[in-house]
Amino acid sequence: MNRPQAVLIAGPTACGKSALALQLAERLGGVIVNADAMQVYRELRVVSARPSAADEARVPHALYGIASVHEAYSVARWAQAVGDALALARARGQVPVIVGGTGLYFAALLKGLSPIPEIHPTIRAEARLKLASLGNVAFHAQLLARDPAMGQRLEVGDSQRLVRAWEVIEATGQSLDEWQKLKGTPVLSGPMARFVLKPNRDWLKAQIGRRFEQMVAQGALDEVRALGAIDETLPAARALGVPPLRAHLRGEMRLDTAIDRAVTETRQYAKRQMTWFRNQMQDWLVVEGATPEAVVAMTFNSLR
């Protein structure tokens, strides 16, 4: 049995997938490749729960901390970067262990992206300024009038996707809805093992609380303080835990209240992740409480 071309590990936040990937990569002689949209930001090591420097020294890691919080790193950029990372792993004889909780990254990996043209930075900046000037309600109303398909799909509070829809129709004259119907080319194909981690819900709920307390003890407040006057429409400004901690730093809420809010929002996000995985990854192997050794065995058994 040949080694798999890649091992994919998806799972909700705080479920222990990074620790599992680390042990799995050590056993397979692999490289860990990030598939988490917040762990690409170099300034958010603590808040995004990026692997520690000690973990990165044990096994090669790729696509962690590669972007600034002051830019909107996109799934399209990740798809291009992961293609390069996979090619490099193949050249070095390493098994890529692709791990994360961002479903769209895995979708881009296996299904490809719609061929939306690159949007000029000026148009992207103008769209963010327009949102900041008008506010979400008025911006959404204008998008609804100009692009009914996307306006009806998007929630008023979803700033990132509202801006994305506006900039696409502004730049191309075509709705993002129409672009998304066009098929892309998968980045990865061939023999692979695909796992979705499914932790016990009560355990995960408690673990999310414990982990955020640890983040605060490890310097999350200093990390958020260092963001300074970051554009509120950028993805990093809305990373889990960042908005309530920024509110605390502005004197708008007590620290314990900010922590409670961050934990609640993280639990809600984990629930949405698990729903997405259940609906979109029905042909992946579901792993409940397996040891790294068991996952290694399943990796090869899944290819038979």
Image (cartoon, grey):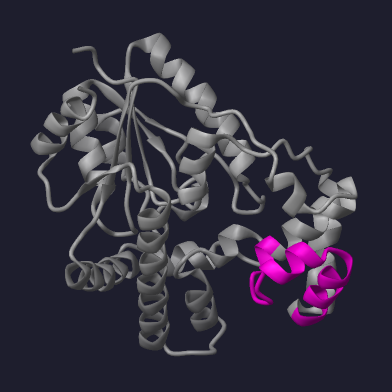
Magenta segment boundaries in residue numbering: 137-161
Q: In which quarter of the image is the C terminus?
A: top left
* Position of residue 139 measured from the top left corner of the image (x, y, whole percent): 81, 74
Would you say 3 lies left or right of 132 here?
left
- The residue positioned 48% from the left and 17% from the top of the image is 87
140 is within the stretch colored magenta? yes
Residue 168 lies, with reference to residue 54, above or below; the image says below
Who is closer to the viewer here, 142 or 286? 286
Q: In which quarter of the image is the N terminus?
A: top left
* Position of residue 60 measured from the top left corner of the image (x, y, whole percent): 33, 27
Residue 282 lies, with reference to residue 256, above or below; the image says above
Which quadrant of the figure has residue 295? top left
* Position of residue 213 measured from the top left corner of the image (x, y, whole percent): 28, 72
Q: Does residue 124 appear in the picture of this structure?
A: no
Who is closer to the viewer here, 210 or 139? 139
- The residue positioned 39% from the left and 70% from the top of the image is 266
- The residue positioned 88% from the left and 71% from the top of the image is 145
- The residue positioned 90% from the left and 50% from the top of the image is 173
* Position of residue 115 measured from the top left corner of the image (x, y, whole percent): 72, 35
Q: Does residue 168 appear in the picture of this structure?
A: yes
Residue 8 lies, with reference to residue 170, above or below; the image says above
Who is closer to the viewer here, 130 or 137? 137
